[in-house]
Image: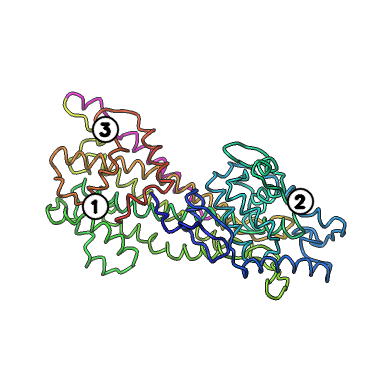
């Protein structure tokens, strides 16, 4: 399981930057949140809201406050209607479709938006910040459709479901039931707010959906990188491969840090095997031998991706912004999700390559032409029962299908920018689509990984049963992993449906529950 021991006091919004790990901990409901008590942070929010009021009184014109939105900026809004405009923004954007974000995804989105508003650049009131914080704290979760954002001018349509909920007009999930936010607020002892002139735009005009989803994707990608290293070690053991492919001197000859780190992980796993066993092949096939070069690319990019995502999490990214110190009104394009889109386009490519790598390794394990004496399709049946048992034959077909679908989704979303909204939003990021694609690629890759866990576990057990491997050759790291998986992965001697086993493994992978099992990686 994940280690949240560092969060004994919960996470204080406004005390400082939040990390991807903070967002993950909050989204999975493992830690509580609270608003900062620091006077400086709260004062910045109050000043920013005051700047909106002062600018409106002084100049009488603020984009999105006294004007229409987007291309409609040239249309002035009469003073008597200014207070109605924010609610209209939430209403006409109520056209999202597709699946509803999962509760953990919604928490991540809400947390990221709260971080932005706490910075004090958005011109919102403390009342709004406190209500959004209370919704997240009490798990009052707006039902947010996943589709409808082009990722510039922000995630307007999906975020409208948060803004509308704050005003009491959208459905939420509360205590396991769907109800109006007004009803949920009443049950929780809260009240909807009347959105002030800049507040609808402040909640909606930003990158919180793509960034929240990106934080979740990153966390799952870190786990997957480590898991593939461990499964490669097990595949190498099962194939009676050559551990010299991961030699420290060899790795240092091409010193990409991530590649060297992956080589070191596998080398540590295979240390006892290398000491006690004589390899049967001089060179293993690429899907084993080149694992450091495949996984290493992801490892080398993760640091850059983390920096980019965390910068976006802690940014002010709506428009216009109000300098909390000077009160200047600043118009720009910080709602543009280009950085997140690049990270998600890149990450889904790297993750799909892991699916492809595991697919190739599993194909070696089940095929008697390449698996160095393992039974066909890794069936554990023997004697007269062997002819009717087919082991992992269909699982391998499934892995091929899941891998193909993952690879198909690696087309970068950013290149599909579409001119929208009367050519005002004429260049858009597609960052939210990229984030959703990345999560789907991760889901498919976790399905491949679940199958590969079964295959590698079965293959090593068969080697131990048939005498090709000895317990001592596994070493403690792989031996402990095999014990950890024993309760989740049955030994397959007679054919049986494996869908429940696969679904269980997939659910635990998606929830990040393998991070503890892989703590020695």
Q: Residues within 10 Å of mark 3 (few under 14, many from 20)?
A: many
Side of 242 where 205 appears, left or right:
right
Q: CA distance from mark 3 to mark 1?
A: 23 Å
Q: Quadrant of the C terminus?
A: bottom left
Q: CA distance from mark 2 to mark 3?
A: 59 Å
Scheme of image coloration: rainbow
Using the image, tell me which numbered label, if any, was put on residue 312: none
Quick one: SS at disc 2?
helix
Residue contact at pointers 1 and 2, CB within 8 angstroms: no
Q: Judge whether residue 390 is colored magenta.
A: yes
Q: Does 306 sit above or below residue 181?
A: below
Of residues 277 and 314, the one drawn nearer to the viewer in this rendering: 314
Q: Which residues are magenta?
A: 384-412
x 21%, y 24%: residue: 385
x 39%, y 53%: residue: 223
Quick one: SS at disc 1?
helix
Q: Residues within 10 Å of mark 2 (few under 14, many from 20)?
A: many
Where residue 479 sits in the image (x, y, percent)? 22, 47
Using the image, tell me which numbered label, if any, was put on residue 87: 2
Q: Judge whether residue 305 is colored magenta.
A: no
Residue contact at pointers 2 and 3, CB within 8 angstroms: no
x 34%, y 45%: residue: 359
Q: CA distance from mark 1 to mark 2?
A: 57 Å
- First reached walking from the N terminus: tag 1 or tag 2: 2
Mark 3 sits on what residue? 492
Mark 1 sits on what residue? 477
Quick one: SS at disc 3?
loop
Q: Does 360 sit above or below residue 331?
A: above
Where residue 26 sits in the image (x, y, percent)? 51, 53
Where residue 183 sits in the image (x, y, percent)? 69, 40
Q: Quadrant of residue 258?
A: bottom left
Q: Main secondary structure of the magenta part?
A: helix
């Amino acid at each position: 399981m994940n280690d949240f021991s560092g969060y004994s006091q919960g996470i204080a919004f406004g005390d400082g930057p939040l990390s991807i790990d903070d967002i993950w901990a909050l989204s999975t409901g493992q830690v509580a949140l609270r608003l900062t008590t620091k006077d400086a942070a709260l004062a910045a929010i109050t000043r920013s809201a005051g700047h909106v009021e002062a600018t409106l009184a002084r100049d009488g014109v603020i984009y999105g406050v006294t004007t229409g939105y987007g291309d409609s900026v040239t249309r002035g809004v009469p003073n008597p209607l200014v207070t109605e405009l924010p609610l209209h923004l939430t209403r006409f954007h109520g056209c999202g479709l597709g699946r509803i974000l999962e509760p953990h995804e919604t928490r991540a989105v809400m947390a990221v938006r709260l971080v932005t508003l706490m910075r004090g650049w958005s011109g919102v009131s403390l009342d709004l910040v406190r209500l959004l914080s209370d919704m997240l704290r009490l798990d009052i979760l707006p039902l947010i459709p996943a589709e409808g954002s082009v990722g510039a001018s922000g995630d307007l349509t999906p975020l409208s479901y948060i803004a509308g909920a704050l005003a009491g007009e959208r459905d939420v999930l509360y205590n396991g039931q769907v109800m109006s936010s007004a009803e949920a607020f009443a049950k929780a002892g809260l009240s909807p707010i009347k959105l002030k002139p800049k507040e609808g735009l402040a909640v909606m005009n930003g990158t919180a959906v793509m960034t929240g989803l990106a934080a979740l994707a990153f966390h799952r990608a870190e786990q997957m990188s480590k898991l593939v290293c461990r499964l490669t070690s097990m595949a190498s053991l099962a194939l009676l491969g050559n551990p010299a492919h991961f030699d420290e001197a060899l790795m240092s000859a091409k010193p990409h840090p991530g590649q060297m780190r992956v080589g070191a992980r596998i080398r540590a796993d295979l240390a006892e095997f290398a000491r006690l066993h004589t390899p049967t092949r001089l060179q293993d096939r690429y899907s084993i031998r080149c694992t450091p070069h495949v996984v290493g690319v992801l490892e080398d990019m993760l640091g850059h991706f983390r920096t980019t995502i965390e910068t976006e999490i802690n940014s002010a990214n709506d428009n216009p912004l109000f300098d909390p110190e000077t009160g200047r009104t600043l118009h720009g394009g910080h709602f543009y999700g280009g950085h997140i889109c690049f990270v998600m386009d890149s990450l889904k490519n790297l993750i799909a390559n892991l699916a492809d790598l595991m697919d190739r390794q599993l194909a070696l394990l089940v095929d008697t032409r390449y698996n160095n004496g393992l039974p066909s399709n890794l069936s554990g049946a023997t004697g007269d029962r062997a002819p009717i048992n087919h082991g992992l034959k269909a699982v391998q077909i499934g892995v091929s299908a899941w891998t193909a679908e993952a690879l198909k989704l690696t087309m970068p979303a950013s290149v599909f920018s579409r001119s929208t909204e009367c050519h005002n939003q004429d260049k858009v990021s597609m960052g939210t689509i990229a984030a959703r694609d990345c999560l789907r690629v991760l889901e498919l890759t976790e399905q491949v990984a679940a199958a590969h866990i079964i295959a590698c576990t079965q293959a090593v057990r068969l080697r131990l049963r048939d005498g090709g491997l000895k317990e001592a050759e596994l070493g403690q790291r792989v031996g402990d992993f095999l014990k950890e998986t024993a309760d989740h992965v049955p030994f397959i001697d007679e054919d049986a449906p494996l869908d429940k086993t696969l679904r269980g493994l997939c659910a635990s992978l998606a929830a990040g529950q393998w991070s503890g099992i892989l703590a020695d990686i």
